[in-house]
Image (cartoon, coloured by chain):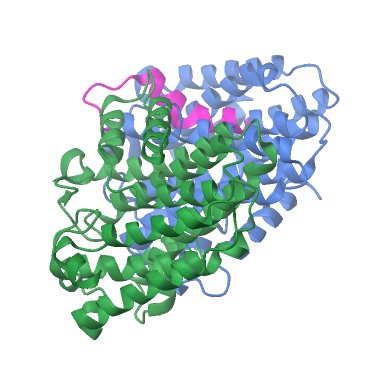
Chain colours: A blue, B green
Amino acid sequence: MDFPDRIETGMQRTLRYATANGCPPLLAKALRHAVFPGGARIRPRLCLAVAAACGDREPLAADSAAVAIELLHCASLVHDDMPCFDNAMTRRGAPSVHAQFGEEIALLVGDGLIIAAFETVARETQQTPLLTAPLIATIANAVGSPYGLVAGQAWESEPEINITAYHRAKTASLFSGAVSTGAIASGGNPQEWLVLADALGAAYQVADDLYDAVGQSEAGKPAGQDSRNGKPNIVVSIGLEAALGRLKRLVAEAVDSVPDCPGAESFRAMIRNEATRLMPKTLATSAA
Amino acid sequence: MDFPDRIETGMQRTLRYATANGCPPLLAKALRHAVFPGGARIRPRLCLAVAAACGDREPLAADSAAVAIELLHCASLVHDDMPCFDNAMTRRGAPSVHAQFGEEIALLVGDGLIIAAFETVARETQQTPLLTAPLIATIANAVGSPYGLVAGQAWESEPEINITAYHRAKTASLFSGAVSTGAIASGGNPQEWLVLADALGAAYQVADDLYDAVGQSEAGKPAGQDSRNGKPNIVVSIGLEAALGRLKRLVAEAVDSVPDCPGAESFRAMIRNEATRLMPKTLATSAA
């Protein structure tokens, strides 16, 4: 199976467990709505690509980490869309979870997906028990407090925002988690992949800001939402041309930093390809 | 160390990690507010008591499970208190997290505590890797969808509520998780403890309903809140005397179902003692 198939198969299996017979019907519907159809699944593909580059030694463990990371990404979108944060009524061209199912269910869907993420890794690594704790600790670090997604979102409630810490926690941390868990699942050394993870995380942040400035983002949020919500956006700070230049430099840095490993060359090709996908279509030709 | 010391030491350690240098200050304050000072810590004490009854073979693993279960209980209180659910302004005699820090931070505190719970088990079981996955899977089952706390809360959003599934998911599941993880951490067989877990979970549900009817609950919610929120309450359904009778029968059932194990006798004594603590003080003498 290719990466997208492995990811969707894993997501389907986890959702079958989470919505099994006896689940409150609305919750079951809303859990599926939050996860299917997905966006670009960028983070889990990155996780599997790093695992493959390291030799794909334990594909089940890699799959479980990829699925967990995507579930946590989905959970963060559901909670971030809620009225107390972005109050976004649409997501990926459909109603957001709270818009369709109410705030109560949206809150519970986020909680349920976070729990399902860790449960998936525990369930799928029973045959590779030495991987369970490192994978879960790495994923928790990427999404929790003090340095993960939760902390990133919490910076928005501070009277003075630490921009570097904010971007690192809110965006780069989950890319880092995807890269690190991919390496861990294949017996690679996650330290060797940290520069790449940071560069890709920063590149994605720039790409997301570009999308916000010019149109639909990968995550399907409407254009201009950052400014409306008073959030920092690099295109607003340094302009479109400079932002595009930074994105190109970050992608080049990511390509250069791929460590020696069995699949290094095809991994580099994937990043270059991914960089084009990352960019808003209207900008892709000018940046290529 | 006795159980309460082990629990508080473990909670403090986990909160030190979650609020380490670099954490957004409000989030750090709110995470601590949600966890300290604690309530009766009934569930983690139960977890450690079962671990002790089974020989306390891996005390660090048992401690991590106990801490995780209490963190998840705290997370559920923070989210349940939010405006879209109970809209409770106080908790344990202090302002609830959303009342003191706002809805955004309350949502993130709940998320952060859920993540910290699984992170704690992963971190503290690195020396006992065969326990990591079973503990995390068991805990996730107790709090997630379709049968744990999240599902329990979601039943309140259904047009028709399945009362048995509701109580089992909302209250009994976390008692079950506490008992099962205590057994797992000591190499015991969690199946042998299921009857006890169910009886204690049901007993606690009755006790909580009694508190709601006559005064302050263990979790510090104001009297009469269930009726105001249209939630099922057994005292309203069958009356005070019958509810007290049911509580006594459930405690006796729990005592009778303690399996053969090294610490069975002291465990039985603990349940009898706990049953008195469970009951509102004004009722304890009449029920003893």
Q: Residue at x 42, y 60 (%)?
A: B150
Most frequent secondary structure within the magenta stretch: helix
Which quadrant of the figure contains the C terminus of chain B? bottom left
Q: Residue at x 17, y 66 (%)?
A: B225
Q: Is residue B152 left or right of residue A103?
A: right
Q: Is residue B162 left or right of residue B97?
A: right
**Residue B246 position in % (x across, y down):** 32, 78
Name the one closer to the observer, A170 or B208. B208
- Give the magenta part as a residue range: A156-179
**Residue A281 position in % (x across, y down):** 57, 38
Q: Is residue B151 left or right of residue B212?
A: right
Name the one closer to the observer, A77 or A108. A108
**Residue B83 position in % (x across, y down):** 21, 56
Name the one closer to the observer, B249 or A223. B249
Which quadrant of the figure contains the N terminus of chain B? top left
Q: Quadrant of residue A198?
A: top right
- Determine whether B182 is above or below B174 in the image: above
Residue at the bottom extreme? B238
Q: Is residue A137 visible?
A: yes
Specify whether residue A178 is painted magenta: yes
Q: Is residue B144 visible?
A: no
Q: Residue at x 37, y 62 (%)?
A: A105
Specify whether residue B110 is painted magenta: no
Q: Residue at x 48, y 64 (%)?
A: B197
- Determine whether B184 is above or below B204 in the image: above
Name the one closer to the observer, A284 or A127. A127
Residue at the front extreme? B265
Q: Quadrant of residue A106?
A: bottom left
- Determine whether A82 is above or below A218 in the image: below
Image mark count: 0
**Residue A7 position in % (x across, y down):** 69, 50
